Image: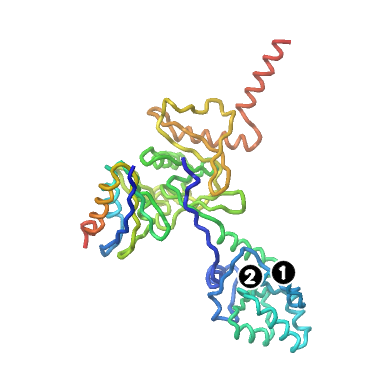
Amino acid sequence: MGEVTEEIVVVNTLGLHARPAAAMVNTVLPFKSDVHINVNGHQVNAKSIMGLLTLAAAQGTVMTVTCKGEDAEEAIEAVRKLVESGFGEE
Amino acid sequence: MEFENLPINRKDSIPVARMVDEMTDDLELDVMGGYQGMGRSVLTADINRPGLALSGYLDYFASDRIQILGNTEIHFMERLSTSELGRRLERMFSFEIPAFLLSRNLKPSKMFLDMCNRRGIPVLQSRRSTDEVISRVILFLADEFSPETMIHGTAIECYGVGCLIVGLPGIGKSETALELVERGHRLVADDMVTLRRRREDSLYAEATPVIEHHMEIRGVGIIDIKSVFGVGRVRNTKQIGLVMQLEEWNQETQYDRTGLSEEYATILGVRIPFLLLPVRPGRNIAVIMEVAALNHRLKELGIHPAQRLNERLITMMNEGNA
């Protein structure tokens, strides 16, 4: 079982609002790994939209993403791509 | 379900400014001086009445607490000569004091206020009586210093019993909660629940600020329970009396069949009755939870149906043998 942790910065202007949160959930859901995101000591499961919304992660927020499981590497790669692409937003 | 590894948030200190912000309305507070010390830290959820310290006895002076000055202290200070008061305050102020709080709109002497201003020790004043000030400050501080955590789950009040529903994503926590709300019960929080320990032995669920009473129902999206069902179907906080974990029916697991043994979940050090509920098509979880909540209330009233049945059975068998 692999475990990887990475710091990823929110780049899109509006931050992690409802639409990006849904995109995040859909991105990580196919992976078997547990994906957790920690912002300032507040940790949530990335497979929960409401959880992600409680982070209130604005633009510039550093998220500590931890993936745990057999496909941890692939999962974190997918999360990084998604966040760094600004969730397809500006 | 793991409850031991939850990240626990607990404040080590709170700045006096926060107490003033939060308690201004409650205590009808005025800040009379020592403004530059508003960043001073309150370290414990307790207060001190510095009567003995003012009389010159400084061993065991609980200096790190909010110092409450009531009639006694103020009048005692008035009796002292200016030079003597100055000396005693000087010695008291060699300790780190977060703030003074005067009750009953009492006025401090000019000298006291000047010294506090020079040292940057905030002087607060409340209109309320001393005992009222003390109990409100202690309650507020106890709440501020109480440990809290967040958990994925749903909190709902069912027949007056605060129920915490936990289980893996997709097991149907939100859907069960929705059905319970539909049946007239009240939602506290869905998906992300803030849990706070108040006093030593009680655990409270709270709605999380941003999401409040919103709920995500797969296929429908985000709904607001307060708007859809009305304000009567939500509440902001509720003491948890029962923890129920949903899991997919597993042939290997031995589920409780009699209710004779009690299981507990320990969350933030609080022991709460725990039920493991298997989910299977055809099992209406909302109804089962209603029954579990009602049964829990019976037990709280000292009525234990499973035990009673068993005792009756044993008595009958004994009589048969006699």
Is B31 on the left-hand or right-hand side of A90? Answer: right
Residue occupied by mark 1: B60
- Residue B180, image x and y in percent? 45, 40
Name the secondary structure under disc 2: loop
In front here: B79 or B217? B79
In front here: B274 or B12? B12
Q: Is residue B80 above or below residue A49?
A: below
- Residue B145, image x and y in percent? 56, 60
Q: Residue at x 41, y 40 (%)?
A: B173
Is B135 on the left-hand or right-hand side of B224? Answer: right
Q: Residue furthest front?
A: A2
| Chain letter, disc 1 residue | B
- Closest to the camera, between mark 2 and mark 1, is 1
Residue B60: quarter of image: bottom right
In front here: B62 or B156? B62
Q: Is residue A71 visible to the viewer in this orientation of the structure? A: yes
Q: What's the residue type where badge 2 is placed?
A: Asp
Residue occupied by mark 2: B64
Q: Residues within 10 Å of mark 1 (few under 14, many from 20)?
A: few
Q: Residue at x 46, y 47 (%)?
A: B187
